[in-house]
Image (cartoon, rainbow, N blue to C red):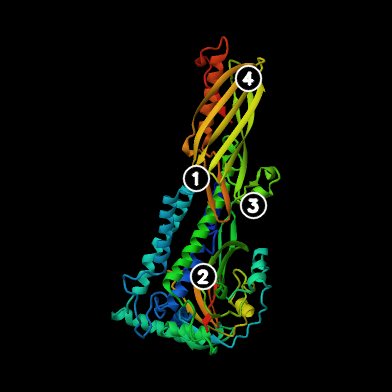
Amino acid sequence: MKTKKRAGYCLGGAVVFLLIVGCILIGVGLLGVKEFKDIPRLVTGFSFDQTAPPPVDYSSAQTRMIQEYGYPEGFYILFFQREGIDGDVEEVRYEEWNYYSQKVSVAFENGEQLELSEIPLETVLPTPYQPGSFSAFVTREQVAASAGLDEWLILPVEKELVPDADLYYAEGLTFGLQNERLVYIETMVGKE
Amino acid sequence: MKKTIIFGILAALMIILPLHSVRAAEKIDYSFENSVLLMISNHMRLNGDVESANVGNGHLLSVPVKQLAQQDKNEIDILIELYASQIAGLRRSGNHSPELEDQLINSLEDKVNDLKERAPKLVEVRRTRRRGGLFGFFGRVAKAVGRGTGWVMGKTMEGAGKVVQFGIEEVAPRVLKKAIWGTNPLGSALYRAVVRDLLIKRVEAVIIRQVEKRAERAQVVLDEEEDDGIDYVASMETKSAIEESEATQDALNENENGQIIVSFTGQMSFQCDQFVGQGGDSQMMGIIPVVVNFNTGAFFGEASYSYVKDNGFTTTSTWVYQGTVSEDGVLLGTWSLTSTVENVDVGVIGGKLDPAVGIITEDGSGLYLYTLQDVDTEMLSIFQAERDAIVSALPGFSDPSEYPPTCRQR
């Protein structure tokens, strides 16, 4: 009877011990995941099985710019949402195209030309990327497929600045993801 | 049983209602501010304004890094400043109707308040120092274990690729630039990488354009809400919209200087329960074209209408508005009203236009015409004055006070 009781205690103790160890391992694992996500890291050798999303159609105003000046020498795009007239959420693609050699900068919102302004003349190495290659709220894998990237540096930003956001630095390109979706992309242009 | 059913319904409501409110609040997942903050942060990091080694929930890595000086502005501070300058600009400009201006300012103030709540948290997390004592020790041990686990997991989590460098201790601008240039030997220097002034100008331009867009959209909403008042339609039209409108196509003229004369038409209607001693409903409709010459700043509007009352009187009236548009877009001038009842000339009455009745502004993309926004009370008083004048002129109706002003806006 006494032996049985002792065996019961041992078994109970073992179960509690295993539970504690399991909890610690799970905790450490979760902490590891969190730490991993919070720390800057350089990643290379992608093996994404991902096809690039279809290119964005240029608006008539954008087509006119391309016909007149060619593809932009540098650009940035912001993707965001806002409340529409009817109270629904509408997506906005705000982009600025820069032609340093022509001293021209032009802004578009959802393809509609907003403003054409003058910028200083510069001799730069034009970006190999085209704005139409990047769609709103795509994943980083789709960005990589669209831009043909094979390496990037991931820099998490503080959640107090933007929650669940990372900045990415790749060849000639930087971009920002929020909730793992593209919300900002910019080409980095070099001087000759 | 009844109690069980009621309890069940209440429980279901308690579950469903909060879900609805949460959904409403989280309608916008990707805000303009967050996209812009990422852009600002990116450039500040490239410029060395923000050192990136101090990342995550305020934990510090082993290598001491340059901390942001307390007086330095962070990304949120910059955005707050830009919004604040927009609010001040809106208050000064008077480019919009007061109602629209209030709407825009309120919306920007909401954004500023939201950002102000976030700013101290960011400052705090960037100021966090290494914690001492037993808690600090255990914290560091836990983090070290966690990072080790993370490193192992990272090999698979990144899934897509191989983590070649994990836990980069100090992400200085040179590290970022190296990532951007990769193996490109020509990329010795980044253009525009990145002067703070240029960045701020850029972000300011984006904000201004977004405020303009919001103003356009809000104006459309305001116009739609005007329906309950006097029907004075199309308070804002762009040049292109006017050009596309068949009804006003003929009214568009261009003078020899290439400036545009817009003929603006609207419609108003009144309903009178009692008029000139007669009971019952009467209704009159009128069209007032207001012609604005943007070359001279002069405007002119004329409206005529006539109708037959139940008592057989025919009333013909003509309103005339004329004056100039001031530099800040306010209509200044006079109005006059000429009326006849059958063949009796009632005479002319008139007065000064309230400067608040109209605003005309111009921007790069077209001419915006805000006309007679606040015209309802003005029109009503004119109408009542007209009625008094007519009543006074009619035999047997010498005292206008016999006919209380029962005309009301429709």
How far is mark 3 from mark 1, CA to CA? 20 Å
Going from N to C along the chain, the mark reached first, 3 or 1, is 3
Nearer to me, B294 or B225: B294
Residue that extends furthest to the right in the rendered view of this protein:
B246
Chain that bears disc 4? B
Quadrant for residue A148, please give it. Answer: bottom right
Q: What mark, if any, has residue A119 been given in the picture?
A: 2
How far is mark 1 from mark 4, CA to CA? 41 Å
Quadrant for residue A84, please give it. Answer: bottom right
Q: Amino acid at mark 3?
A: Ser
Callout 4: helix, strand or loop?
Answer: loop
Give the residue at mark 3. B240
x and y, in percent, of residue B53 in the image: 40, 81
Q: What mark, if any, has residue B280 been given in the picture?
A: 4
x and y, in percent, of residue B243 in the image: 67, 49
Q: Amino acid at mark 1?
A: Gly
User: Vertically, is B128 above or below B317?
Assistant: below
CB contact under 8 Å: marks 2 and 4: no
Give the residue at mark 1. B329
| Left or right: B119, with B267 as reference point | left
x and y, in percent, of residue B303 in the image: 61, 31
